[in-house]
Amino acid sequence: MNAKKIVEYIVSWLEKYIKKSKSNGFIIGISGGIDSSVTSMLVAMTNYPTLILEMPILEKNKNLLSNKHVDFLQSRFLNVHHLKKDLSSLYSSFCHIVEDHSSSNLSLANLKSRIRMVTLYYYANRNNYLVVGTGNKVEDFGVGFFTKYGDGGVDIHPIADLNKSEIRFIAKELNILDGIQKAKPTDGLWEDQRSDEDQLEATYEELEWAMKITEKKKKINCDEFEGREYDIMKRYQILHKKNRHKIIPIPICHIPSSIKKKIE
């Protein structure tokens, strides 16, 4: 894998896209994770105005990796600007209105992601910026590990054709902070700080393996595998089927022209 060539290709793609869209710049939410760190670096390399937005919600500990990455970017790029907006009161107000304060409620976990999406688009609209997605290939097209109309609500996806292992290579090429490269992936939506692996019941590398096999074969029989490989393939198939509604385009009820003609 030629990481340098991929970096150059993505940066060029971003430059062409923003010119065509006639937008003024990019906006991206960062978490201190490897995906958002790599993506924000690639966006900054276009030299277009890039707004980096941190959006903590009821976070007990300061996100030091996120802060360090902001400093890392601003020390290298004059086009990078940073905002930090604590959305805790907005989130808490919603919980109060619906009378729900459960820390294990998936609906509320997804709400955090959707509040962040609304905030990103507020600043995007004000500045005529493009909202940049940070999802990788396994998340976006394999197991659908994102919030619909939350972190899945974006204008462009620069790294969505890259698997996690490939993104790790890109991170090394870009000299992303070592702490970020080694950090355990987490979506940051839960108070107990559960990792992505805890939720998915598999590592990204394991799911990447299952996705590659699935792409090669039209039909996969889990009984072809044994032990851990059986568990991974079974888990991949369950997640892919469960979250397929996020991966495919929104279904449209197409009315036959013969029926339409009758009501004209």
Image (tube, grey):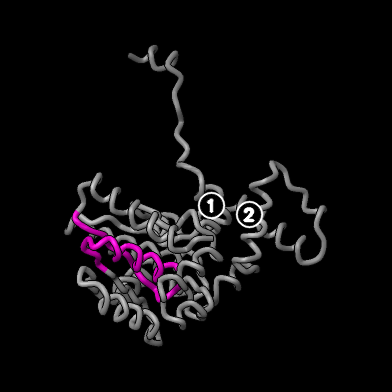
Whether the magenta-drawn stretch holds residue 36 is answered as: yes
Q: Assign the C terminus to one quadrant of the image.
A: top left
Residue 13 in percent (x, y) is at: 35, 51
Q: Which residue lies at the image location 52% right of the left edge and 80% below the top edge?
A: 182
> Spatial distance from mark 2 to mark 1, Cα to Cα?
9 Å
Q: In this view, does 94 lie above or below 233?
A: below
Residue 100 in percent (x, y) is at: 43, 71
Tag 1's secondary structure? helix
Q: In this view, does 65 lie above or below 166?
A: below
Q: Which residue lies at the image location 42% right of the left edge and 56% below the top edge?
A: 152
Q: Assign the N terminus to one quadrant of the image.
A: bottom right
Q: In this view, does 39 lie to the left or right of 205?
A: left
Q: Work out whether mark 2 precedes mark 1 in sequence or the reverse, and give the earlier one.
A: 1
Q: Residue 211 carries which label?
A: 2
Which residue is tagged 1? 141
Which segment did they paint magenta?
Answer: 24-51
Q: The residue under label 2 is which amino acid type?
A: Met
**Dot 2: few (<14), some (14–19), or many (≥20) neighbours within 10 Å?**
many
Do tag 2 and tag 1 residues touch (Cβ < 8 Å)? yes
